[in-house]
Each structure stands twice: as C-alpha cells, then as structure tokens.
Amino acid sequence: MPNSDNWLDEMIEAFEAEVVNVRQAYVKRMSQDYYWYSPILKRQLESHFGDCVAAPRTEQELMNVLSFAAKRKIPVVPRGGGTGNYGQIVPLYGGIVLDTSKLNQAIEIKEGEGTFQAGMKLGMIEKTLHESDQELRFFPSTFMKSTLAGFIAGGTGGIGSIEYGTLWDEGNVLELTIVTVEETPRKLKVKKKEELAKYIHSYGLSGVLTEAKITLAKKTNWNDMLIRFADLDQALLFSEKVAINSNIKKRLISVCEAPLSTSFSPIERYTTKEDATVLLQIDPSHQESVTKLASTYKANVEDTFPHYIHINKLRVSDFSWNHVTLWWLKQHTKDTYLQGRFHPDHYLEQVKQLKDRFGDKVLIHFEWIKVKGAVVPSSQPVIRYHSPARLQEIIDAFHEFGIKVSNPHTYLLEEGGKDDWIDQICVAKGENDPYSLLNPGKTKRRANKKQIR
C-alpha cells in the first residue's frame, strides 16, 4: 500500500489538472476493462479501482509521474485503450491508473517499418499508414480503440496473424522504448528478440512502454467473404484448406458454429440458426480460387456480402476474434468463453470429443493463425455458463483432449496460458521496478524483496 496518506493531495499540487483526474466516476471507468466477459473475474474485480488517473502529455511528464510514484511507493497500472479481457488494467491495490493515450503521435514511417508512441490507437495507425500504401501486419478486433502499447503488453495476435504470426514471432516487433519506475526513471531501448519478449504480453509488469517500432505490410485491398456450411466439419475442413494454402493470400479465416453468427446483428441477413459460417478476408486475385474450393464442400457463398459490407461501412473484423464473444454476450449475458489452441492434426477429433461430451454448451469458434511459421487452429469457443464448477469441468476436458488452454478467467499472468516468458518478465521487473509498483498482484512470483505490503 502507499506509504503516505496525503500522496493524492501532493500529486494534485505537483501536476496540472489536465494531467491528474480524481473524479470518482471517471477513475472507476478508467480502472476497468472487459474482464466482465468472465463471471469469475467479474466477481473478483468489480470492486477494485484506482485512486486517480494520470494522463501525461509528453514522455517527460510520464517520467515525472513515475518518479513521483517511486518516491512515495504508489502503485501504478499502465492503461492503453482498456479493451483487454483479463483485468490487466484493474488496480488491485489502488494507486495511479496511468493513461498513456495522450502519447499518440506517429514518430517515423518508412517503407516496411514504423515507430509510434505508445498511446496511438491502432485504428489511427492503420489509417495513417494507408497514406504511404502500407498497413499493419496484424491487429486485434478491437483495433479502433486499442492502443499500440496496450496491444503489445496485453495482446497476442489477431486479424493478419494467419500471414504474420503473433507478437512473439520474430520480425513483428522491432524495438520498444521502456521507462523504469524509479526515483530517477531510466529510458531503455530494447531490440534483441529475447529482450523484447520481457515486455510482450507482460501486463505492464516489467516496465512502461512509451514507443514501439513495428514491421509494416504493403497495403492490400482485401475482399470480404462470408460462406455458409450446413455442417461444422465441412466449414472447418474448408477453412483449413484455405489456411494452409500458401498460394492464397489472406488476412482472416474465422469459423463460427451455428448459431453463433446469428448474434451479428448488422449482418444477420446473411446468417441462419442452422449454418456454420466462415468469414474471410482474401486478396481479390485469389477470390475465384476460394470460391471454387468452397463449391467442393457444397457451401453457400454470399455473393452480395462484400458490397453490403462496403455500402454500410462495416468491418468484417468486428465479427471475428473476441468480437464474436462480445456479440453473443449482448444477447446471452450469462454466458462466457474460453481460449484454446487445438492440435493441427487432430482438431476435428478434439471438436468431436467436446461436442459428444458437452453438446451445445460449448459452441466452436476458430481463428486460424500462424505460430513460429506453423498454421494452427486457435479457438475462442463460447461457453453456455452454468457455474464455476461446470466451467472448470469444461477446462479440465480441454486439457484431457489435448487442447492447450489460455484461461481467460484469471488475472494472474502465468495462469492465463501465456507463461513462456514469465521468468524473464520477472527478471526485467526486478531490474526496472525495484519497489514492485507496476501492476502489483498480477503475478504469483516475487521479482525482488521490495514488495508492497
């Protein structure tokens, strides 16, 4: 806990009103993300808030806030767009919610790479890149609100990962600028792959990210497709064929078991309660090949779908990844989801095992991606929630069937299934955050002896 009862008064006096906000309703809103996707996290986190929000306008102002916190031992939780699902930004011990959204400038854009401040929204980066005929390699479905630093510190992959992999794959994140939480904060430039991994999907535990250099892709005028299948297995087999075909350039392959896609109200005219759907973004020059492939699976290709998306100014990405869960929860508020990585050689059998045991209590949703160059079926199935015990039974079954689970019902970093680099993250935390002020409580490990009491 903070070691000074009047630190908040001191902070208000030390910083301008534009930087520090103590309005209770605003602080509560900025202390939350989409953790309520999980009924477990909703119960655990809904009463946790920060004491204030600090929104520095410059990197130096950010360093001043961190220096203030270090001197008084005040917890600091970095916040991007607040679109995470695991309570990453929920302060467990009060303190300062560090809003980085005012650090939102493009620093340098060259052919093939760009450097941007931490708080720049991915949607704005994408729009800016189009001016140079470039685009992001990949992004989450929440990219219009997500910030670059929030994505790097809390995300994994997204639309485009079928071509370029995840944040950990070499060549995607080139350089990070990290600021330490000390009486005199240091600014670090991190470039080596093994060093970068200390800050990717770290929940901001190991340092405050202020800039990032990322690799860019040449812009493609992607064609949106929606294809319906009477049988889920046929939809999955078709989607796999598209995923593994290196001659087909694609950005998205999203598969939903019926009736998941009926919750997509803006495009419900193209869905039915009986049909599985596959949403794709395909290079226009390869659309004919995909259409011919779909015909071999007796699928229904919705020819008017691309035009409908265009004239209604919709984004196919809004009906993929965890937006699938969001649309479903709008109509089924008691349900939840899981995250799992199925085996590329046995995924159909794994799906059958789940359906045989749980039926429509587990609704399949696949997103095909690459991991270290290999095509794998990632999944975010919807769970018809009944109780914590039943949810744990389903998680245990995933493990039993050989499906790797990234558990979205815990706020502890290493319990969420992304623990490959937890040792290195904790080493960096010990070096950069000597008083363990950054997002305390989000890991089971102790980086050093100067923990908050």
Image (cartoon, grey):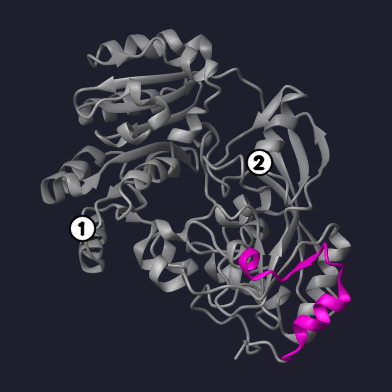
373 sits left or right of 128 in the view: left
Give the residue pinned by disc 2.
122
> Measuring 71% from the left and 81% from the top, which residue is drawn there?
74
Residue drawn at (38%, 33%) of the image: 264
Residue 24 sits inside the magenta stretch: yes
- The amino acid marked with disc number 2 is Leu
Figure check: 68 above or below 267: below
* Circle on res. 189: none
Q: How far from the left and from the top, in percent, is residue 192?
A: 70, 54
Q: For numbered disc 1, what is the local secondary structure?
A: helix
Rounded to the nearest angstrom, the CA distance separating label 1 from label 2 is 36 Å
Q: Secondary structure at mark 2?
A: helix
Q: Can residue 186 be seen?
A: no
Q: Which residues are magenta?
A: 4-27
Where in the figure is residue 377, as x and y percent of width and height?
A: 36, 40
Would you name the residue on which mark 1 appears? 397
> In screen coordinates, is 213 left or right of 307?
right
Q: Position of residue 239 (x, y in %)?
A: 34, 27
| Residue 203 located within the stretch drawn in magenta | no
Q: Report crowding for label 2: few under 14, some 14 to 19, many 20 or more residues within 10 A (C-alpha).
A: many
The amino acid marked with disc number 1 is Ala
Residue positioned 88% across, 63% down in the render: 60
Location of residue 360 by image quarter: top left
* Image quadrant containing the N terminus: bottom right
- The structure residue drawn at horizontal position 70% and vertical position 26%, both measured from the top left corner, is 134
Q: Is residue 159 left or right of residue 384?
A: right
Mark closer to the observer (1, 2): 2
Instruction: Rate crowding at label 1 as few (under 14), some (14 to 19) or many (20 or more) other CA atoms within 10 Å.
Output: some
Q: Nearer the viewer, residue 18 or 296?
A: 18
Q: Position of residue 220 (x, y in %)?
A: 61, 20
Of marks 1 and 2, which one's residue comes earlier in the chain? 2
